[in-house]
Image (cartoon, coloured by chain):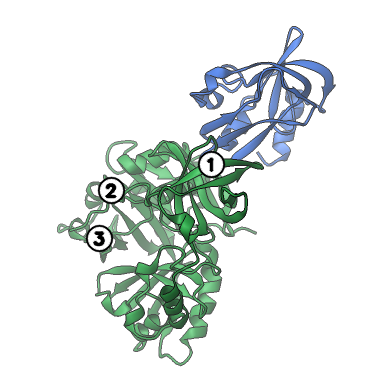
Chain colours: A blue, B green
Amino acid sequence: MSAIPADLRYSKSDEWVRVEGDEVVIGITDYAQEQLGDIVYLELPRVGATFAPGDSFGVIESVKASSDLYAPVGGEVTAVNSDLESDQQPINSDPYGAGWLIRMRPSGEEEELMDAVAYAAYLEGRGH
Amino acid sequence: MLKRTPLFDAHRAAGARMVEFGGWEMPVQYSGIIEEHHAVRQGAGLFDISHMGRFMVRGPHAVTFLQHVVTCDVTAIPIGQSSYGLLCRPDGGIVDDIFIYHVPDEFLVVVNAANRDKDRAWLQEYARGFDVELEDRSERWAMLALQGPAAEALLVNAEDCETSELGHLPFHGVALTSMFGVNVLIARTGYTGEDGFELFFKAPHAEMVWTRLLALGTPGSVKPCGLGARDSLRFEPCLALYGHEISETINPYEARLGWVVKLDKGDFVGREALAAIKARGPARRLAGFEMVGRGIARADYPVHALSGERVGHVTSGMPAPTLGKPLGIALVPTPLSAEASEFDVIIREKPVRARVIKMPFYRPRYKKA
């Protein structure tokens, strides 16, 4: 059973969002990293890039698969996790911590996001 | 409804992640593709490959029939040996790649899971006029592969008899032995680029044999492996995968499998077309490549010449775990298949430069006498 922290919100494409002051931190969920397997490649946007909710902001790849990353909220990228450039392992081992992907200053527009209970039910419904 | 092997419950219980492959529900990974990949390169890994098709061919015309439908020379396979071969269409396209094992009084033909029905129909169609019997043993037998440099030492201990059969089994050799009280047909064959064995035995024993093989050596000596590692392990030594490097619209010369086509063995299905293709040279060919730009090429990504013109496609591509970099195989015009040629792979609509390198990427470490 994959971890679903109670204090985060979740997108249908398996990103998580954590509010920190007037910014948000975004990553992929434990379920997503499990499905992908060992992550070996990551493409993240530049600081200053802006995205609408649902836009692809990057690409994440494992041995087996390539997957787009979708912005759960709109806004401007204020930081990216550059530690992941040389080593993507934290995305697998600590997806909600050291494996965070980007920080954004939100525009206020967002995808329909789920709380932890709703996301757990959503995963259940996908036959997890 | 997806088909399941006799080991489906064992895979699920062991926490394997199951995926659809060629109509089958199979484990793609247990602990992780990279870990399983390295286990096979460095130690030993166990695969359930019971989804593969297994046909017995016997009868007075068994040799002449097989000689008629496959490209390799079946008369050159003595009893106790096996050979890689191709079934080709009359136009030279590849129906399937197969392994033919010569056992006393009959041949065992192993075919790809996704092609089982097609191959059975193909063989039956061409068997007309030959005095042969074709028996599908796919459901009755399980098939496991124990692969890796440690496989031999581990497996010798599993044999029931005093005198080991498999210790002196040559490369591609096949013999009948007994393990854990079960009759096992064992062959020194595989699909990983490592020394290793493939085991055939009656399906009801599958779970017992699987469990006992996993318990060989010290705990963790034998790692259960899924189809993910099976794919990355075959990719590095550039072993063809049906539907990727080979298909009905790709001929053996394009796939660099000319060595499997014995034009001088006498007539066989596809011979005329293949002789003509060989004489004029294939217009396109498989080429192994590394990335010059940043990105990972995947199967079906387009390949563009530096002029921008679309000239081919990627057949397989991934980050190669042993070599530690993304590599790929593409079907491109023959001039572009020469080493050091450059082309662009279109990755998410952007051209990324790639350079042709020698195949195989990983030199197989078979145990040859």
Residue labelled with disc 3: B171
Residue labelled with disc 1: B353
Residue drawn at x 38%, y 68% is B258
Whether residue A127 is situated above or below residue B159 in the rendered picture: above
Report in which chain the residue with disc 2 lies.
B
Q: Position of residue B25 (x, y in %)?
A: 57, 53
Residue labelled with disc 2: B151
Q: Is mark 3 on a helix, strand or loop?
A: loop
Looking at the rendered structure, the kind of residue marked 1 is: Arg
Q: Can residue A7 be seen in this view?
A: no
2 or 1: tag closer to the N-terminus = 2
Q: In which quarter of the image is the N terminus of chain A?
A: top right
Crowd class of label 2 (few under 14; some 14 to 19; many from 20; radius 10 Å):
many
Q: Can residue B232 be seen in this view?
A: yes
Q: Residue furthest right?
A: A109
Q: Residue furthest front?
A: B307
Residue B290, image quadrant: top left
**Of residues B304 and B62, which is closer to you in this image?**
B304
Report in which chain the residue with disc 1 lies.
B
Q: Position of residue B339 (x, y in %)?
A: 40, 51
Whether residue A89 is situated above or below residue B155 in the rendered picture: above
Residue drawn at x 42%, y 54% is B338
Crowd class of label 1 (few under 14; some 14 to 19; many from 20; radius 10 Å):
many
Whether residue B221 is situated above or below residue A72 in the rendered picture: below
Residue B61, image quadrant: bottom left
**Of residues A39 and B109, which is closer to you in this image?**
A39
Looking at the rendered structure, the kind of residue marked 3 is: Phe
Of badges 2 and 1, the one in the foreground is: 1
Q: Which residue lies furthest to the top in this view?
A: A21
Labels 2 and 1 within one chain? yes
Q: Are marks 3 and 1 in contact (CB under 8 Å)?
A: no
**Of residues B116 and A52, which is closer to you in this image?**
A52
